[in-house]
Amino acid sequence: MRIAMIGSGYVGLVSGTCFADFGHQVVCVDKDPAKIAALNAGRMPIYEPGLDALVAENVEQGRLSFTTELKPAVAEADAVFIAVGTPSRRGDGFADLSFVFAAAREIAEAVNGFTVVVTKSTVPVGTGDEVERIIREIRPDAEVAVASNPEFLREGAAIGDFKRPDRIVVGAEDPRAEEVLREIYRPLFLNQAPILVTGRRTAELTKYAANAFLATKITFINEIADLCEQVGADVQQVARGIGLDNRIGAKFLHAGPGYGGSCFPKDTLALVKTAQDAGTPVRLVETVVAVNDSRKRAMARKVVQACGGSVRGKTVAVLGLTFKPNTDDMRDAPSLSIITGLQDAGARVRAYDPEGMEAAKPLLGEVAYARDAYDCAEGADALVIVTEWNAFRALDLARLGQAMAGRVLVDLRNVYDQASVQRHGFRYVSVGRPGDAEA
């Protein structure tokens, strides 16, 4: 199959590269000449484990290429995937579809012969209808079928998710579109990946519903963690106790500082706005959004409390800036609210992240960036683990204690065992677990 991928950001680049690895001929298109030049030089615009090697291999094999020229890529394609950004729109929080519709207009002018136009971007219900309307208006003669194929990729594990998916959702009204997409995903047949074929609007809503449900699980266990702290229970054991129930499942039941990233914040908000416009508000998701927003700032107050009620004039070391490990994505990362809250309380902040510091610098003012975890801890009155990178899971606690001016460790990801940390003379504070105390 000949595939054009419009948009070479996270979704477009990963999806296009994996399609090429399946054996398809893929051209990734992006309007940013600098990004395309970097990709042609083998430099990745994002950090995703294993992506650079996979891109290099498929470029070398001649299956993957990058260009700023949309028209020739679309004209030769059997399927054109729209994988552009849909950020929250300023002012009302609804998904900004301007990039999607702009892509649809350019595609309409370039299609040649029967082509399946597939929305890969996360879009509100009815977007596919509008994409089809735009194409029909500009090119009434075009032989086009419009479909929805939402992505379910986790940053940091995207290649594995694409090649070993839980499911592939195809929203199609035209049987020809279903046939083309089944052929594109045929290499996954041996993995027995189920293909769920639905109407286009159903597929669009499925993606939003999935992300909203996962965000709800995270927010639920975070509220249970707060209750655990008040009543002397252990949230990790509670999570295991409920997660062993197959109806609930263990995933996304890890208490922490709240969710962030490129998907959950904007998708939950867009679902809220879509439901309000439809006259059927999703009150549960509205509450999830509100609770998560307030939780991030509350984590700064947790650090202040651990430091005796004041951090004014103190140095706080922050380990982990990205919203999760194995990515350089800073979008809606809890660290942004936590660091700002600490600075508002008068703290000096030093930070270290294995991949996210360059992305963090334009977003955070007056933060000193360190070379590694121990450099970050040097002279600090308190150390805060915000993102659970593997590099932070087995720190030399004795060395940390010697480097720091104070011995307060606030573990917002529950990485460490309380007793072992306290044996090294730290005051240890975690999330939703009893026994946090002065050593």
Image (tube, grey):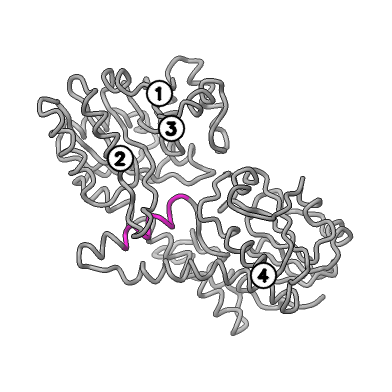
Asked whether, in this view, residue 306 is left or right of residue 179, the answer is right
Residue indicated by mark 3: 8
Q: Which residue appears at 29% of the width and 34% of the height?
A: 103
Q: Earlier in the sequence, mark 4 or mark 2?
A: 2
Q: Which residue appears at 37% of the width and 20% of the height?
A: 25
Q: Secondary structure at mark 1?
A: loop
2 or 3: mark nearer the eye: 2
Instruction: Work out how far the residue at label 2 is from the one at label 1, CA to CA, in angstroms.
Output: 16 Å
Residue indicated by mark 2: 100
Q: Amino acid at mark 3?
A: Ser
Asked whether, in this view, residue 379 is left or right of residue 190, the answer is right
The reply to whether callout 2 and callout 1 are in contact (CB within 8 Å) is no
Residue indicated by mark 4: 430
Query: Is 205 rendered above or below residue 184?
Result: below
Q: Which residues, given as a range, are shown in magenta?
A: 262-272
Q: Secondary structure at mark 3?
A: loop
Query: Is 228 rendered above or below residue 257?
Result: below
Instruction: Work out how far the residue at label 1 is from the one at label 3, CA to CA, in angstroms.
Output: 10 Å
Q: Amino acid at mark 1?
A: Thr
Q: Amino acid at mark 2?
A: Val
- Crowding around mark 2 (Cα neighbors within 10 Å: few <14, some 14 to 19, many 20+) is many
